[in-house]
Image (cartoon, coloured by chain):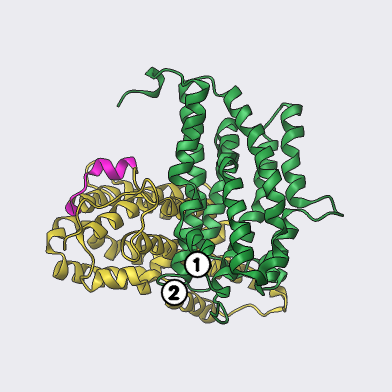
Chain colours: A green, B yellow
Amino acid sequence: MTSALEKPVLSEVEFIAGFHAIGEERYHHKHPFHLLMHEGQLTRGQLQAWALNRYFYQSRIPIKDAAILARSEDPAFRRSWRKRILDHDGDGSKPGGLEKWLKLVEATGLSREQALGGDGILPATRFAVQAYVELVSRRSHLEAVASSLTELFSHKLIALRLDRMRQHYPWLASGLDYFTSRLTQAPEDAEFALAWVVNHAHKREEQNKAHAALRAKCDILWAQLDALYFAYVNPGWPPPGAFRPAKDTR
Amino acid sequence: MTSALEKPVLSEVEFIAGFHAIGEERYHHKHPFHLLMHEGQLTRGQLQAWALNRYFYQSRIPIKDAAILARSEDPAFRRSWRKRILDHDGDGSKPGGLEKWLKLVEATGLSREQALGGDGILPATRFAVQAYVELVSRRSHLEAVASSLTELFSHKLIALRLDRMRQHYPWLASGLDYFTSRLTQAPEDAEFALAWVVNHAHKREEQNKAHAALRAKCDILWAQLDALYFAYVNPGWPPPGAFRPAKDTR
């Protein structure tokens, strides 16, 4: 193997194209659980399991963003990144992303208390989400910011999801505010993060690490859907102690 | 909910029975991947995936034991716990558990380099194993030690496994030394750890936390097999970048 240090620095265009190639291969828009969701094939119980488990992921987003904030000595970076925490936690009057996700949980028919308590979430969800917080806390600041670049791909996925959810699961309509907000928030966040990563990865080794961080983040998202699929779709084996849907009707 | 503080301290017999009840419900001896293994239903490719992923778990055992060692101010505890690191790392002349697991990897037909490099292991394996190292590093020393009590249940599982592997997968015979060693090592380790936990959990809250730590450890083992089953048995969807068996013949 040739050392990364011997390889030439990628041009900006090549570096950015690398992120998009990773997304095309590894982002969870291709995961079979999402494909079923968007085809209208999921039961209410399966959507409950998804909303419940994903709430744990949502709940750690402001924590991971605060960890990233805590690593920067640059007020301009911190001012920009602070927006993410506001987006998810709200300002105390207008609801933030966490509150909106709780509305989605309630729209599936589960209580917000069940999501807040975290009882019954899959251990695999917990492990993957913890790995995300560890990644942004322990790897370099550059890698932490690069791991957020899944936002580059989320607009397209969320636009499709909104469309298909309205079509296939009209009973979820009161829970879709999270997604409408993300349609504008995610591209703003991705634009800032991508420009920052491009400006701060000067060596090929740094560029490689930034690509690897995005790959790791894609693994974190993908593993959560693998676990949901295994536990609630096929073969349908939630581990001991995990949430079991009360009924599995469409 | 009644607070744990209001509940009476469990007797030694009740406290120990609690660990056994958790094992009966949650230890991975009941996992369908192990059931298939012991029925002779796994292909060589599936056993390769198992040996490869489990090597990552094995590789972190001496690290988690060193983390537990580092938390104790008691030389007697450290002297006893040190044996575990020796068991897995060896003494430089006689092979330890890691070397023996590499022999198992080779017996499946993969190279030791593939296991040592960790390429192709499932992200879910990595997340679960990292969660184990985090647990013993961040929770109380008592919980760290209690999490090792899955060893209470491993003798029976390993004795069965040895028997069934010799019967169903005779081509693995050169790789079974790890298990024969664990038949004597694991009960010694479990006996010490159980006595220590019993002697150091004086309050009901501590007893509850010790039980919860064993539950969490069972989740960590179970999640690894869920991921293997999903990726390599049914539906057989390894995530992007994961190991794919070259051929899936029995």
Residue under the image location 12 percent in, 59 percent down: B171
* The magenta segment: B107-117
| Residue located beneath label 1 in the image | B214
Q: Examine the residues drawn in magenta and state their main secondary structure.
A: helix
Q: Of residues A7 and B185, which is closer to you in this image? A: A7
For the residues bearing labels 2 and 1, Cβ distance under 8 angstroms: yes
Q: Of residues B187 and A225, which is closer to you in this image? A: A225
Q: Is residue B133 visible?
A: no
Q: Is residue A87 visible?
A: yes
Residue under the image location 31 percent in, 60 percent down: B232
Displayed quadrant of residue B191: bottom left
Q: Write down the chain letter for disc 2.
A: B
Give x and y (percent) for residue A101. 69, 60
Which quarter of the figure is the N terminus of chain B placed in? Answer: bottom right
Q: Is residue B115 magenta?
A: yes
Residue under the image location 35 percent in, 64 percent down: B235
Q: Of residues A45 and A72, which is closer to you in this image? A: A45
- Calculate the distance from the C-alpha at mark 2 to the C-alpha at mark 1: 8 Å
Residue B157 placement, left or right of B13: left
